[in-house]
Image (cartoon, rainbow, N blue to C red):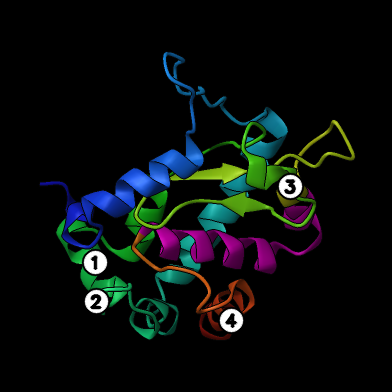
Amino acid sequence: MSPRSKFVGRGVVAAALMTLFPCAAGRAAPRFAALSSWDAAALERARMGAARRLEGAECQKVLSDFTDPEGHSLLANLEPWQQTPSAYLRQALTFLDGSTLGLCRKGTVVLVTSRGQLRVFVCPDGVSASGSRFARIQMENPTLAEAMVIHEMLHTLGLGENPPTTFEITDRVLARCG
């Protein structure tokens, strides 16, 4: 049993996979590209900053502030990984180009993941060919970019959305970790 199976039922995983990886009968699921060097550098700066923030006791409390739909704290969902929040962020999560995802075509979506999944997708800019919206945010407001990475990490540990709203999640991360 994988660590995430403790808190994500098979039905939820199947639904999430169908949402992220729809494919017609007989066609292979889409392959996701690695990030461009520009986006990878911005993401790595934000991930390392977020990991430093998660080393603090106050920031780690954000994992106890939220629960998954089954009522487990996200901190409890991290336990099977036998990693600190900082190590989990640095080692368990993969960030990929999300340009093929429908959600990334919305002008306001920056990062995308599904509850309990270890992949986080970075949405392209759509305006400029030189990087993602996330890369721009990271350059202009590194603290917000780091909070966004922690926000997505919370989803990978089982946090749903609506409720809480995306803004409530990010505001809580900023309050605890900012």
Disc nearest the viewer among 3 and 2: 2
Marks 3 and 2, how far apart in space? 33 Å
Mark toward the start of the polypeptide (4 vs 1): 1
Q: Secondary structure at mark 2?
A: loop
Q: Secondary structure at mark 1?
A: helix
Marks 1 and 2, how far apart in space? 7 Å
Q: Is residue 115 magenta?
A: no
Mark toward the start of the polypeptide (3 vs 2): 2
On residue 72, which mark appears? Answer: 2
Looking at the image, do the residues carrying marks 1 and 2 touch, with CB atoms under 8 Å apart?
A: yes
Disc nearest the viewer among 1 and 3: 1
Going by the numbered disc 2, the residue's amino acid type is His
On residue 168, which mark appears? Answer: 4
Looking at the image, do the residues carrying marks 2 and 4 touch, with CB atoms under 8 Å apart?
A: no
Mark toward the start of the polypeptide (3 vs 4): 3
The number of numbered discs placed on residues in the rendered structure image is: 4
Question: Dividing the picture into quarters, in which one does residue 141 lie?
Answer: bottom right
Residue at left offset 70%, top offset 62%: 142
Q: Which residue is mark 3?
A: 135
Going by the numbered disc 1, the residue's amino acid type is Asn
Residue 154 at what x, y percent from top left? 42, 65
Q: Which residue is mark 1?
A: 77
* Label 1 CA crowd tier, 10 Å (few <14, some 14–19, many 20+): many
Looking at the image, do the residues carrying marks 4 and 1 touch, with CB atoms under 8 Å apart?
A: no
Highlighted range, magenta: 135-156
Marks 2 and 4, how far apart in space? 19 Å
Residue 147 at what x, y percent from top left? 59, 68
Residue at left offset 39%, top offset 70%: 55
Marks 1 and 3, how far apart in space? 29 Å
